[in-house]
Image (cartoon, rainbow, N blue to C red):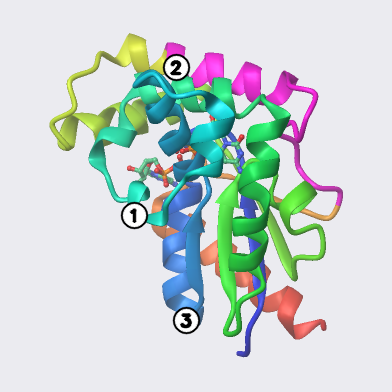
Amino acid sequence: MTGCTVAIDGPAAAGKGTISKAVARHFGFAHLDTGLLYRAVGAKVLGGASPEAAARALNPDDLENDALRTPAVAQAASEVAAIPAVRQALLEFQRAFAGRDGGAVLDGRDIGTVICPEADAKLFVTASAVVRAKRRFAELSEKGISVTYEQVLADVEARDARDMGRADAPLRPADDAVEIDTSQMSIEDAIAAAVAVIEAKRGGV
Ligand code: CDP
Ligand code: CDP
């Protein structure tokens, strides 16, 4: 299978990243977790930077950092993500990544709607807020990040509301996205469903 752009969007902790990594491995595509861009800007803002300056100065080396996983940084990310100048500053990097030879998978909130409206395959991955919060809580606890389940659920619900309600690039499925609800699915089944959708789209080109 030759190069292809795959857009994977959905709410917090739906399984986008896990599915994206597996899909990228399966097809030999590069993967960009675009949430990390907003998390890196959010972390800099918590450290006193201005959102727009932080977005303009963002360096890909800033993305490999476990400190970006905390609910406090996630909230800050969601706040800066509502600022149009921040989204604009991050747009070009994402589009350049998406256009690389050999294929790319990008996951986030607006990949299918704004960043890559011409993507070859678009997936919208969802699950109930309770299921997502339980999964994220287990993941953070395993990494030794100290949080309560209640904090994680509150973070997920607050971000969902902000991400869906903002004026610029709100979280919503693209008209041509295929929805995968992973509430009752194992991660293996969710990956298999995503691979099948992409193969079908590619086969139909
Ligand atoms: O990228 P996103 O925030 O959408 O989610 P993720 O980080 O890929 O997934 C959150 C957690 O849920 C991870 O620990 C996944 O392994 C887990 N997960 C799961 O257990 N079953 C699924 N069907 C999807 C995700
Ligand atoms: O991993 P999780 O799904 O919990 O969040 P994330 O993908 O790391 O995204 C963190 C925050 O960045 C989201 O709550 C959004 O506000 C924002 N974001 C966005 O606005 N657009 C994207 N393409 C990706 C993330």
Label 3: state its secondary structure: loop
Residue beneath disc 1: 61
Which of the two discs, 2 and 3, labels the residue nearer the N terminus?
3
Q: Which mark is residue 28?
A: 3
Quadrant containing ligand 1 reads top left
Quadrant hosting residue 150: top left
**Counting other residues with Cα less than 10 Å from the Cα at mark 2, is it few (<14), some (14-19), or many (20 or more)?**
some
Quadrant hosting residue 3: bottom right
Residue 180 seen anywhere in this rendered image of the structure: no
Residue 2 seen anywhere in this rendered image of the structure: yes
Residue beneath disc 2: 155
State which quarter of the image contains the C terminus.
Answer: bottom right
Tell us which disc is closer to us: 1 or 2. 1
For marks 1 and 2, give the CA distance.
Answer: 26 Å
Tell us which disc is closer to us: 1 or 3. 1
Label 2: state its secondary structure: helix
Say which residue appears at 13% left-offset and 31% top-offset: 144
Residue 74: x percent and y percent? 43, 26
Residue 203: x percent and y percent? 74, 84
Q: Which residues are magenta?
A: 154-175
| 194 part of magenta stretch | no
Relative to 147, 2 lies left or right: right
Say which residue appears at 16% left-offset and 36% top-offset: 142
State which quarter of the image contains the N terminus.
Answer: bottom right
For marks 2 and 3, give the CA distance.
Answer: 33 Å
